């Protein structure tokens, strides 16, 4: 049976029937959001949107209705703020769920990866962390925290924990703006063999939001990863926050029987 608002030409990744329920009743802001979304599709990356006042007049609604529509488009990453205005955002960065580094994932999309070091500290390994990186409680561990960049735009925050015994010269030999995976492989001769990874959605803490440069209410994608070398020994424990409006994740699934 054919339904109205469910065109045969609909993109496979789009919401069914444009997200409109069968009874046809939708919130006013959502109708405005759909209309502004169509305008966004017509404009190019970086082009400015009309002001809230102009949009309210154009669609015959209150400015608060326009603000709610814009808030959702901002959270979805289709728009971004520039000064006091709003412009069309570029496509989201696609990061593979694999052992490839952040550097490789960003470069594949023609963007320039970078990092800003927040801190590199050495301290006794706490009990909760010890089993994850194969250490005894109290053994020395490094903690490295870096802001992730793509074309100088802050897009994430990464915390890495590694054994000092295994990487004793990390504070002297490693360039914090470079790929940690390349350093581990090329300078230390360690190859990553596998990883356990868990993904969840969270809100950034006030400190994290300040470092990444986002509102605390912006949803984040949080990845926990424990990586192992080819011999099965733990190599790193990483906690990475990615901006939900700037990132999506991809993977390829195998054909095992269900």
Image: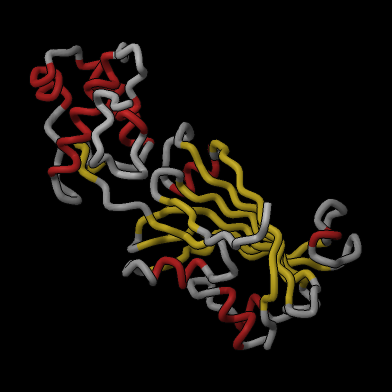
Farthest front residue?
1
Picture layout, residue 50 above or below residue 146: above
Choose top left, top right, bottom left or bottom right for residue 123.
bottom right
Q: Quadrant of the N terminus?
A: top left
Question: In the picture provided, is 175 more to the left or to the right than 4?
Answer: right
Residue 149 position, x and y percent, is 42, 61
Point 77% across, 73% down: residue:
164
Picture layout, residue 49 above or below residue 90: above
Choose top left, top right, bottom left or bottom right for residue 13.
top left
Decide if residue 80 is in sight here: no
Colouring of the image: secondary structure
Picture layout, residue 74 above or below residue 69: below
Question: In the picture provided, is 249 more to the left or to the right than 194?
Answer: left
Point 15% across, 50% down: residue:
44
Residue 180 position, x and y percent, is 58, 74
Decide if residue 108 is in sight here: yes
Picture layout, residue 216 above or below residue 151: above
Point 45% across, 47% down: residue:
243
Residue 32 position, x and y percent, is 22, 22
The number of numbered badges drawn on the structure is 0
Point 77% across, 78% down: residue:
166
Residue 16 position, x and y percent, is 36, 32
* Residue in front for this viewpoint, 245 or 169: 245
């Amino acid at each position: 049976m054919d339904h109205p608002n469910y065109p045969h030409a609909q993109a496979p990744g789009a919401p069914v029937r444009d997200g409109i329920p069968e009874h046809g009743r939708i919130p006013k802001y959502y109708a405005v959001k759909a209309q502004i979304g169509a305008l966004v599709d017509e404009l190019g990356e970086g082009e400015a949107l009309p002001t809230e006042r102009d949009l309210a007049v154009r669609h015959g609604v209150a400015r608060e209705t326009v603000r709610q529509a814009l808030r959702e488009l901002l959270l979805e990453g289709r728009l971004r703020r520039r000064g006091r205005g709003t412009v069309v955002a570029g496509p989201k960065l696609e990061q593979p769920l694999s052992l490839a580094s952040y550097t490789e994932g960003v470069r594949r999309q023609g963007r320039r990866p970078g990092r800003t070091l927040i801190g590199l500290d050495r301290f006794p390994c706490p009990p909760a962390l010890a089993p994850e990186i194969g250490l005894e409680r109290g053994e020395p561990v490094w903690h490295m925290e870096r802001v992730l960049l793509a074309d100088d735009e802050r897009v994430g925050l990464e915390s890495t924990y590694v054994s000092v015994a295994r990487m004793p010269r990390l504070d002297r030999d490693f360039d914090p703006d470079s790929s940690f995976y390349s350093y581990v492989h090329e300078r230390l001769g360690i190859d990553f063999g596998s990883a356990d990874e868990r993904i969840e959605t969270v809100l950034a803490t006030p400190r994290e939001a300040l470092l990444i440069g986002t509102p605390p209410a912006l949803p984040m994608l949080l990845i926990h990863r424990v990586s192992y070398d080819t011999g099965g020994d733990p190599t790193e424990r990483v906690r990475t926050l990615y901006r939900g409006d700037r990132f999506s994740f991809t993977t390829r699934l195998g054909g095992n029987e269900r």
